[in-house]
């Protein structure tokens, strides 16, 4: 017999009743579904009033003067580098253990990524190692707030020459804070991600934030093909029939109003999501403390718990990490490596002649980290299942 349910209902049933506990699942539902009606019925689909409202709300929540919505965190990072004038001949220091996009954006600008090792406890950039790699060509550092824990930006700033720019890769850090200050305003510019693996999502999407009016103005134009007026300004202005001037080599990195409508609903839930995640992270901490072979993530002040990333001790673990992950998958529990060591990826290995041991902590994180399921659609029974399966090894 044919299933008469709407595809969306069938999908929701599939995702909520599946036997594998996913590593992440966006907490979207009826409210987001209703929110997209307005732009769809109104017919304003590309960057417009919803994007403006989302930017305003995001800037307020993260206590920054400017927020610009983009198609992804990758494009927000790219915009930041271009807006701040990074180009050929420049070096940009990035951590070796991060998502590949952090380094790729440096290459997009014709600049050179210079890797630094990471702190194996916090998974963020090793400040001493980063500072040791500063040369006369260093124009910027991109500290990554990996898994929702902020990098030690104060120590970085204190050790860097004054003219070196700090760009936060805050892909995982919506709602995170550092010494009481929200991520997004800790450096010159910052980039957030709304990919579905992040705490709040717009499907794909990103946000560029800054307190620098000059950089915001340039990035705003670069995001829209380099146009001196946004589509909204032009359509609502006195002469909508005239095209503006284009005096920058820009891109099309605009978010749609449909995405922003989802983003507004998600942003309103961000604090609840973080509170719930922090609760379950603490619970994991208590329940898994008895496993001597599993190092649990550091509990840092202001952590936003985008992911719960453990490390499997290769010397004392009952099984190698990859075998453990396979066994857990067979038991219906999804796990993933925290992220990857970019210097070990084929493109970087070949182009820059890098070896795993060049960044020993990043290499160790690459092979030992194991993220456990943590998201806002998990039940108490799901968490209990993860813990019992791990304790049974
Ligand atoms: C640390 C980090 N930087 C950048 C990105 C890229 O984000 P997006 O997928 O929104 O481009 C990610 C995505 O996973 C990430 O984890």
Image (tube, grey):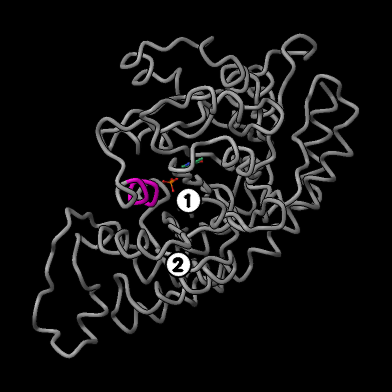
Counting from the top left corner in percent of width and height, residue 112 is at 33, 28
> What count of labels does the image hold?
2
Would residue 137 be counted in the magenta stretch?
A: no
**Residue picked out by circle 2:** 66
Residue 212 quadrant: bottom left
Counting from the top left corner in percent of width and height, residue 80 is at 37, 50
Where disc 2 sits, the SS reads strand
Q: Is residue 304 above or below residue 132?
A: below
Give the magenta-colored segment's residue range: 76-81
Label of residue 41 in the image: none
Between tags 2 and 1, which lies in front?
2
Quarter of the figure that contains the C terminus: top right
Counting from the top left corner in percent of width and height, residue 337 is at 59, 28
Would residue 173 appear left or right of 314 to someone viewing this image? left
Would residue 380 appear left or right of 132 to someone viewing this image? right
Counting from the top left corner in percent of width and height, residue 183 is at 59, 54
| Mark 1 C-beta to ligand 1 under 8 Å | yes
Out of 124 and 21, give the one closest to the viewer: 124
Residue that appears at 48% across and 55% down: 194
Residue that appears at 51% across and 59% down: 10
**Residue picked out by circle 1:** 195
Would residue 80 be counted in the magenta stretch?
A: yes
Residue 29 quadrant: bottom right
Q: Is residue 265 above or below residue 321?
A: below
Q: Residues within 10 Å of mark 1 (few under 14, many from 20)?
A: many
State the separation of the CA atoms marked 2 and 1.
Answer: 21 Å
| Mark positioned earlier in the residue sequence (2 or 1) | 2
Out of 300 and 294, give the one closest to the viewer: 300
Query: Magenta span: helix, strand or loop, mainly?
Result: helix
């Amino acid at each position: 017999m044919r299933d008469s349910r709407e595809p969306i209902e069938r999908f929701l049933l599939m995702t909520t009743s599946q036997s594998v506990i996913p590593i992440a699942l966006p907490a979207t539902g009826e409210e987001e579904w209703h929110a997209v009606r307005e732009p769809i019925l109104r017919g304003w689909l590309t960057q417009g009033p919803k994007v403006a409202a989302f930017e305003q709300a995001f800037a307020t929540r993260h206590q920054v003067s400017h927020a610009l919505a983009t198609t992804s965190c990758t494009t927000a990072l790219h915009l930041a580098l271009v807006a701040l004038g990074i180009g050929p001949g420049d070096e940009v220091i990035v951590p070796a253990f991060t998502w590949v996009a952090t380094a790729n954006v440096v290459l997009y600008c014709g600049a050179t990524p210079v890797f630094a090792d990471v702190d194996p406890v916090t998974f963020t950039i090793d400040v001493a190692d980063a500072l040791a790699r500063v040369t006369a060509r260093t124009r910027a550092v991109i500290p990554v707030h990996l898994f929702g824990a902020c990098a030690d930006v104060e120590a970085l700033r204190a050790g860097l020459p004054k003219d070196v720019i700090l760009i936060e890769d805050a892909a995982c850090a919506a709602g995170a804070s550092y010494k009481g200050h929200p991520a997004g305003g800790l450096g010159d510019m910052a980039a957030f991600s709304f990919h579905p693996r992040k705490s709040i999502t717009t499907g794909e999407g990103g946000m560029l934030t800054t307190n620098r009016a000059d950089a915001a103005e340039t990035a705003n134009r670069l995001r829209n093909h380099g146009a001196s007026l946004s589509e909204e300004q032009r359509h609502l202005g006195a002469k909508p029939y005239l095209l503006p001037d284009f005096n920058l080599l820009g891109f099309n990195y605009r978010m749609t109003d449909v995405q922003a409508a989802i983003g507004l609903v998600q942003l309103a839930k961000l604090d609840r999501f973080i509170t719930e995640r922090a609760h379950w992270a603490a619970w994991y901490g208590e329940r898994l403390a008895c496993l001597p072979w599993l190092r649990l993530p550091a509990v840092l002040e202001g952590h936003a718990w985008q992911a719960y990333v453990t490390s499997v001790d290769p010397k004392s673990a009952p099984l190698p990490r990859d075998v453990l992950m396979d066994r857990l998958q067979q038991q219906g529990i999804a796990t993933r490596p925290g992220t990857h060591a970019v210097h070990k990826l084929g493109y970087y290995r070949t182009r820059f002649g890098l070896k795993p041991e060049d960044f020993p902590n990043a290499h160790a994180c690459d092979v030992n980290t194991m993220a456990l399921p943590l998201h806002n659609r998990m039940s108490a029974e799901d968490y209990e299942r993860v813990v019992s399966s791990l304790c049974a090894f």
